[in-house]
Image: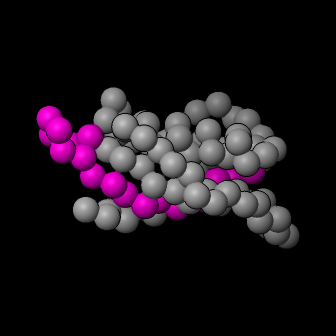
Amino acid sequence: MEDKRLTDATAAQFAARRHLEGMYPEKVKAIKFRKCWNHVGATADLWEVEGMVTVKRLLCFKTRKLFKYQLDARNGNVVGWEEISRD
């Protein structure tokens, strides 16, 4: 992954999208972002991104998963993430 500073919500959403597409190559049908906010702290600056991803499983079946990412604002690396299956 390129080292890039995340300056706004669009850049944070793009970094989360890249990570999701890397986890499910050629299976991501749709990604909807719900919330995106910045935490400025004494030790680290983080972007938190929440949303829902639709992933293709078999032929015409799909599954929806809620996700939450924590991204380092300095370089765009994923610090933590969580996924919850809805189906």
Residue lying at 77% horizontally and 65% vertically, measured from the top left: 39
Q: Outermost residue, front direction?
A: 60
Q: Quadrant of residue 1?
A: top right
Q: Please tell me whether residue 36 belongs to the stretch shown in magenta.
A: no
Q: Is residue 7 above or below residue 4?
A: below
Residue 69 appears in the figure = no
Residue lying at 69% horizontally and 53% vertically, measured from the top left: 72
Q: Outermost residue, bottom direction?
A: 42
Residue 14, percent across and down? 62, 39
Q: Please tell me whether residue 59 belongs to the stretch shown in magenta.
A: yes
Q: Main secondary structure of the magenta part?
A: strand
Q: Taking 63 as reference, is 48 left or right? A: right
Residue lying at 52% horizontally and 37% vertically, measured from the top left: 18
- What residue range appears in magenta? 56-73
Question: Which quarter of the rendering shows the C terminus?
Answer: bottom left
Residue lying at 47% horizontally and 44% vertically, measured from the top left: 31
Residue 57 appears in the figure = yes
